[in-house]
Amino acid sequence: MNQSFKALVVEETEDGQFKRSIREWNIDKLPKHEVLVQVHFSSLNYKDALSATGNKGVTKQYPHIPGIDAAGIVEESSDDRFEKGDKVIVTSYDLGQNTPGGFGQYIRVPGDWVVPLPVGLSLFESMALGTAGLTAAIGVHHLKHNNVEPDDGPVLVTGATGGVGTMAISILAKLGYQVTAATGKTERESFLKSLGASSVIHRDKVQDQSGQPLLSARWAGGIDTVGGLMLDTVLRQTKQGGTVACCGNVLGHELHTSVYPFILRGVNLAGIDSGYSPMELRKKLWKRLASSWKPAHLKKISQSCSLEELNQKIDNILEGKQVGRTVVDLNV
């Protein structure tokens, strides 16, 4: 298909700098995978911002189109599971990293990456959720799988104003959990409570440097999005049999802790890998996100922008200024 489309393209200059621009890209330059999707919406994630600024740990070759999330309509498919006109979601795997991603009006991906849009979600809503929503849902799944229930006590969500944090609060609150939100942006307390947080605490109160192997038990469980000392502290504060699901490393990729939370309180530490989570789990959780787990405040959590407005949004997320989710509208 010799047709061009609009995309945010990141290029590496001769002096090793990276520049972003909106330009035309040809469909024939997309990888020769099975499913061609016309992208209607994407979303902005921290990994997208890294790719857009030349992080070779995320994207090895440039020029490149970032965007690890995409939702749209199948244009062509050699995979019998999909046909022209199907509404679909594609998140994570290699999309937007080394495979041209959702910041372009078309993607071509393997059929094994594609999830049918479940009944109960619009294309826009699926990207208001995006990888952040799926990541939060996997965290909630781990809590439920390990029998952490609303009656067991408060659940802590760290990095509460970020994409995963806001989604986790919204899902947990809808399921009846008492949620404590930890954030460095306590001026956002009213926003977090409007999503369902029962209380908001400053993140410094969840960073204990005393070195004590155990602390007073406060949390039935937690969803940690930042890692480092905060994750260590949450583990030491978790109640008997509790579960902490983790997915981030903003405060550091190393975890210094002791065995005591695990051998004296039976605490579970569950990792969240939304990038390569099994398709069976993905489909199950997307169906829940379209129904009983669907956040009640998707519009409040999300804001939309055009490709032309995306440059500033990328700068904002790198500077820690983004709150909630940014949906990229490829239709304008």
Image (cartoon, helix red, strand yellow):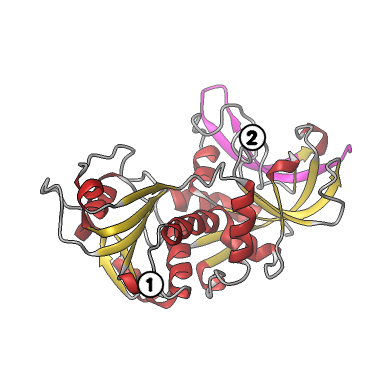
For mark 2, give the secondary structure: loop
Choose mark 1 or mark 2, whichever is in front: 1
Q: Determine which residue is flagged by label 1.
A: 150
Quadrant of the image occupied by residue 257 = top left
From the viewer's perspective, tell me whether residue 282 is left or right of residue 108: left
Residue 148 in picture, x, y percent from top left: 38, 64
Q: Determine which residue is flagged by label 2.
A: 64
Question: How many C-alpha atoms fall within 10 Å of the one at disc 1: few (<14), some, or many (≥20)?
Answer: some
For mark 1, give the secondary structure: helix
128 lies above or below 19? below
The three-letter code of the residue at mark 2 reads: His
Task: Identify the residue shown where x is 64% and y is 47%.
Answer: 279
Residue 8 in picture, x, y percent from top left: 65, 44
Report the magenta residues as a range: 1-24
Q: Quadrant of the C terminus?
A: bottom right
Q: CA distance from mark 1 to mark 2?
A: 44 Å
From the viewer's perspective, tell me whether residue 120 is left or right of residue 182: right
Residue 215 in picture, x, y percent from top left: 15, 56
Task: Identify the residue shown where x is 52% and y is 50%.
Answer: 45
The three-letter code of the residue at mark 1 reads: Pro
Q: Nearer the viewer, residue 282 or 42?
A: 282
Q: Is residue 162 visible?
A: no
Residue 272 in picture, x, y percent from top left: 46, 48
Disc with the residue nearer the chain's start (1 vs 2): 2
